[in-house]
Image (spheres, rainbow, N blue to C red):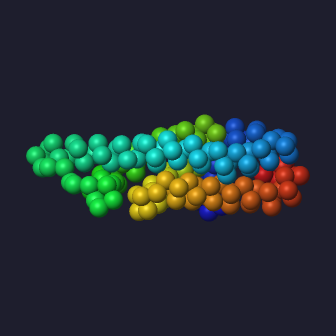
Amino acid sequence: MIDQTVIPGPDNAPIDKLFQTRLAAWLLFVFGITFAPFFEEILFRGFLLPALCTACDWIAERFRHTRARPLDQNGHPQWSITSMIIASVLTSIPFALMHAEQTANALGPFLLLISVSLVLCGVRLATRSLAASMLVHASYNFVLFSLMLITTGGFQHLDKM
């Protein structure tokens, strides 16, 4: 909501066309809080983020001629803060770009999606749990869809979106 006030998005974004019927809105609600977070988190925070963290540290080790950090007591890699920051940014850009067409490539939603992705990366890295970032992602989408549900009277007045 703050994002729409500071940097408003387009009035007729392609995502709005998906909300033309009540059934479509309900299907998107269910998809947006189940399948979308599940698959997006597996791809971006389950695969891409750890791969980029490892690659960043590997590159730094080659430049500095240092040895790789040993695994922690649980067998997890111990990435540097720098690699986690770089990997989070590099993960967040394609995540936001994947959603950009839905929001008509508007700057405001793009920056918001990068911010959301950075939070999700932080959750994933801090907890070492993909389930945690999936839960946060699903919760975020649930709040967005719930606000739409409330403002449209149970998706009965989709013209109010």
Residue plotted at (68% across, 57% down): 142
Give the residue at the far left of this rendering: 65
51 or 12, nearer to the observer: 51
49 left or right of 119 in image: left
Q: Is residue 11 something that shows in the picture?
A: no
32 or 128, nearer to the observer: 128
Q: Is residue 131 something that shows in the picture?
A: yes
Residue plotted at (40% across, 47% down): 49
Horizontal and vertical percent position of residue 161: 78, 51
Location of residue 19 (image quadrant): top right
Horizontal and vertical percent position of residue 135: 58, 58
85 left or right of 36 in image: left
Location of residue 16 (image quadrant): top right
Residue plotted at (43% across, 42% down): 47
Horizontal and vertical percent position of residue 87: 36, 48
Give the residue at the far front of this rendering: 74
Q: Is residue 24 above or below residue 88?
A: above
Count of labels shown?
0
Residue plotted at (62% across, 55% down): 138
Check the picture and name the quadrant holding the N terminus: bottom right
Horizontal and vertical percent position of residue 75: 31, 55
